[in-house]
Amino acid sequence: MPNRPANPPPAGWAPRLFWLCSKVFVAVYGRWPVFGTLRTAAAVVRQEDRYLMVDRSDGRGLGFPGGIAMPWESDRRALERETEEETGMRVTAAEFWFRYRVRWPIPCWIAVYRATAEGQARGSWEGRAVWVDAGEMRRRVFDSHEAIASRLG
């Protein structure tokens, strides 16, 4: 029997569709940010010496759970919704840590929270939920989240 990861990515078309959507969004919005700088949120969830991350289906590496806030959402609410969508885990506490701006590949403000979450980690169309140590996090973190990894280092 092959050695399979504990949280395999979903089978079928969904991860491929996310890959395509991500590539198109980055290519288009990076050039023409029609809604301006987006608001996003990211959760740093740590258990002992490991961090909860999403091994992204678009091939961009590891990202902290989180994503774009809807216009009517607070950063905290976006963090809770996106973390559950991406990892299946429910945020039980979150403390604002810092905010920073990235201009590439898409312009956004990222609100970073130190969070705790409960539940069983599972993947989504966006990628596979994984627990990684600090070394792997720093080696594979995707560009927009390097500022978070460096503060943790």
Image (cartoon, rainbow, N blue to C red):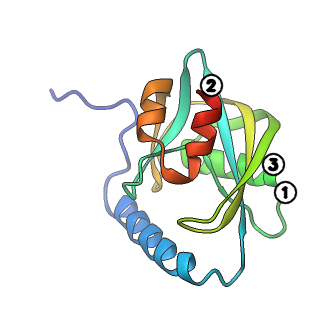
The residue to which callout 2 is attached is: 46
Tell which circle, 2 or 3, labels the residue nearer the N-terminal end.
2
Query: Which residue carries the number 1 mark?
Result: 74
Question: Callout 1: 10 Å neighbours few (<14), some, many (20+)?
Answer: some
Image quarter for residue 60? bottom left
The numbered disc on residue 76 is 3
For this view, does 1 lie left or right of residue 7? left
- Give above or below for 130 relative to 58: above
Q: Is residue 82 above or below residue 119?
A: below
On the image, the x and y values in percent for residue 76 come to 81, 48
Under tag 1, what secondary structure?
loop
Which residue lies at the image location 75% right of the left edge and 67% below the top edge? 70
Q: Nearer the viewer, residue 71 or 26?
A: 26
Q: Amino acid at mark 1?
A: Ser
Q: Pointers 3 and 1 in contact (CB under 8 A)?
A: yes
Q: Secondary structure at mark 3?
A: helix
Among numbered discs 2 and 1, the one appearing first in the sequence:
2
Name the residue at the top extreme: 48
- The part of the image, by quadrant, that contains residue 108 is bottom right
Q: Residues within 10 Å of mark 3 (few under 14, many from 20)?
A: many
Q: Residue furthest left?
A: 1
Depicted 37 relative to depicted 118: above or below? below
